Amino acid sequence: MSPIVTVRQDTFDAAQTEQSVLCMEVSKDHFRFSYLDSQKRIAWLEDFAFPSLLTERSLADNLPAIFQDHAVLPAGPWQQVLVSVNSPAFTLIPKPLFRKEYASSYMTLMRGSALPPHEYAHFFEQPNENFVSVFNVEHRLANYLAGVYPLQNLTFVHQTTALITASAAVDRHLISTQNLLLYFEDEFATVILRSNRELRFCNRFGFKNPLDLTYYLLYVIEELRLEPYSVNVLLYGEITPFADTYLQLAEFMPHMVFGQTPAGIRFDGDNFDDLPEHRYLSLYGLSLLTA
């Protein structure tokens, strides 16, 4: 399987992986990864899109075709392997209320039903925030990656954890203290509000057309007691100035701009200059979680 995007330095030294970090994002639609060299610079980034016929398969089913004979992915051991799971089922629990033995119960309450047998509840304490992220992981995915990276520092997080981390890095360099960050995917948008440098709202919303999304965002803004014509909105992910979604939102949110690469993200070489700064925020946020 060939990537739709590849940006990298000229060479990869497999002997240097013990000082490097591998970051991966897995979803039913795509697989993305980057690796950070010993100086914590992104030295390689690839993006794979799965054909629609494969999107109903287990996340683990699509990975062997990518990993086989790949120059980077089967290498190791790594200093750290971070895996972001892009799934619709997640919840954020305040730290004082969180009990790890209730992780499955939190997911059941959020979903309205118990997790299926092929999934389990996983949790991750959000750095520098007062909550714990609880989300579902497929057993087969976890087992496959544990087999590829045996006895290594393998950490699973939810995609929203990476986005929240990235939003904090973006927010602290903005003049505005009320910043609404929108991260777009195919028929999904993650909405994050940071107020006075603190996380105030995070949710993921599925939509079929721009009107649905606009209605939802205006509702959220009203509930948060903000003004749509004054709130500072930053756009990330799969969106362009020519998209219908952008044109619709611009009618109600005039202070809307495309976001920049978060502070703390560095690249190895100028090959990465052509990447749109707003495109890979979730992957960049994962890089910021490195130990």
Image (tube, helix red, strand yellow):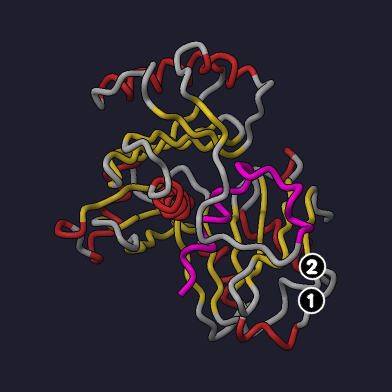
Q: Residue at x 69, y 21 (%)?
A: 242
Q: Are marks 2 and 1 in contact (CB under 8 Å)?
A: yes
Magenta-highlighted residues: 270-291
Kindly indicate the quadrant of the structure image that contains residue 161.
bottom left
Decide: is 104 above or below 275.
below
Q: Which residue matches tag 1?
A: 12
| Element assignment for label 1 | loop
Q: Closer to the camera, 193 or 74? A: 193
Q: Quadrant of the image for the N terminus?
A: bottom right
Residue 88 has which mark?
none
Q: Residue at x 84, y 70 (%)?
A: 10
User: Mark 2 belongs to which amino acid?
Assistant: Gln
Q: Residue at x 83, y 72 (%)?
A: 69
| Residue 105 at x, y percent in the picture | 26, 53
User: Mark 1 belongs to which amino acid?
Assistant: Phe
| Element assignment for label 2 | loop
